[in-house]
Image (cartoon, rainbow, N blue to C red):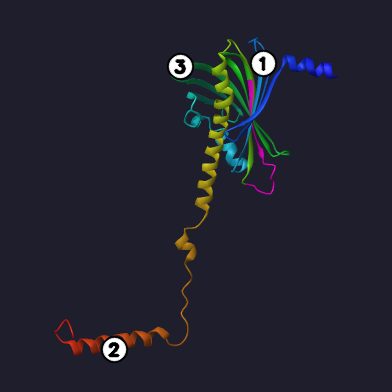
Amino acid sequence: QQEVVNGLNEQLDMKTFTSQGVRMWVLRESLEDTKKATFIAAEAEVNATVNELWGVVRNYEEYSDIFKNIGQCGVTRYQGSNIVNLDLNVGMQSIYYEVEAILKLLVEEEQEPVLERKLLNFSQVDGDFESLIGRWVVEPSEDSTNPYKSLLRLEFQVVSKAKLPGPIRSHIINQLFPSNVKALAKQAELKSMRTMKSNVPFADEAMKEAHVELPGSNPFDSIQNMIDTQKQSLQVSTGDTPYQY
């Protein structure tokens, strides 16, 4: 068995790390063979309900605003269907390089009521990768006592047509994917905060108390009468002279 494990380690490049608060798992077969698949998983806890997070994940029209590496996102929905077609123009650039890719994705939305889990499965039907399949997973957090916490996970397997330089590949895996997961999580958290704020009454309204007329005379009337009497006596004594010494 140990020989089998050693043989697998020679063929597979496995790495786990945390970047920008996102837990990452990267499993790559041969680093030299571009036809071998790379499996990547990214996971983050989100301060939002499952439904709030799911609403952001499937809001494809906003992808170009949420994700920095998506320039355009064409969306084709079908009435009464859970199938969506996406036309994506993705890329990244720096002062040293620029990388672009065009993807046509088939998306299938799925919900699992028993596990309280929602899935967004996607696969490339045409584009600049040899193959690309994956899914977004939205499910309750391990802290099940808090409904305003959920778990967001991205899982996908990709095979490239061309071998990317090491620094570019490293940046995509170590920075770009965690950044995308974090951006989606933040968008859901902002939506959740706005929802909670709209459900809380304004402070001045919350502090208002009903006015009740008490029986009998108002105890403040005698105080007001005393103040009025003093004002009148001062006016009589001072006359037209504004200062008294």
The reply to whether the C-beta atoms of the residues labelled 3 and 2 are less than 8 Å apart is no
Tell me the residue that label 3 is attached to. 96
Mark nearest the camera among 3 and 2 is 3
Image position, residue 119 (x, y; %): 65, 31
Part of the protein shown in magenta: 133-147
Q: Amino acid at mark 2?
A: Thr
- Was residue 175 drawn as part of the magenta stretch in this picture? no
Image position, residue 109 (x, y; %): 63, 30
Q: Quadrant of the N terminus?
A: top right
Closer to the chain start, of discs 3 and 1, is 1
Tell me the residue that label 2 is attached to. 229
- Was residue 134 drawn as part of the magenta stretch in this picture? yes
Mark nearest the camera among 3 and 1 is 3
Q: Amino acid at mark 1?
A: Ala
> Relative to 43, is 200 on the left or the right?
left
Assign a secondary structure to mark 1: loop
Q: How far apart in space, not on screen, are marks 1 and 2 (Cα)?
A: 94 Å
Q: Quadrant of the C terminus?
A: bottom left
Circle 2 crowding by C-alpha within 10 Å: few under 14, some 14–19, many from 20: few
Q: How far apart in space, not on screen, are marks 3 and 2 (Cα)?
A: 86 Å
Can residue 185 be seen by looking at this rendering? yes
